[in-house]
Amino acid sequence: MADEKELPERITVLAREFTPAAMEFHRRNMSEKGYRMEGQIVQRRFQMIEGLGAPKDLFDGEVFYAVTFVRKGAEK
């Protein structure tokens, strides 16, 4: 396993369909890498804010299923 200091605290994966998002934890052996799944897998639309401007849709406003993996022991 990589040095714990090198691992990001959180990793978020996006998928167009629920099943690939749900299977990602097992496919990448995230538990062995020190991660747990945080929250539920839900559809989200992503936006970016730059400066004081209005938020702009990412991915042309398409919604994606998002799943976040958090390193075990990481502060919330």
Image (tube, rainbow, N blue to C red):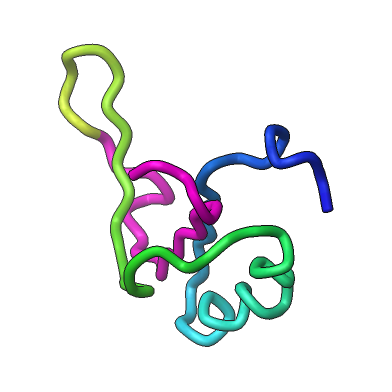
Q: Who is closer to the viewer here, 9 or 4?
A: 4
Q: In which quarter of the image is the C terminus?
A: top left
Number of on-image labels: 0
7 magenta-colored = no
Residue 62, picture quadrant: bottom left
Task: Determine the residue positioned at 27% across, 35% down.
Answer: 56
Q: Quadrant of residue 66?
A: bottom left
Considering only vertical position in the picture, is 16 above or below 13? below
Residue visible at 55% across and 52% down?
Answer: 71
- The answer to whether residue 8 is above or below residue 21 is above
As displayed, is residue 26 above or below residue 65? below
Q: In this view, does 20 lie above or below 70?
A: below
The residue under the point 53% across, 87% down is 19
Residue 30 x/y as whole percent: 66, 66
Q: In the displayed structure, does residue 75 sit left or right of residue 69?
A: left
The span shown in magenta is 56-76
**Quadrant housing residue 58:** top left
Relative to 15, 24 lies left or right: right
Q: Which of 44 and 36 is in front in this view?
A: 36
Q: Name which residue lies at 71% across and 59% down.
A: 33
Magenta stretch holds residue 67: yes
Pick the residue in front: 71 or 66: 71
Most extreme residue toward the front is: 73
Q: Residue furthest bottom?
A: 19
Image x and y of residue 65, in percent:
41, 70
Furthest residue in direction right, as rendered: 1
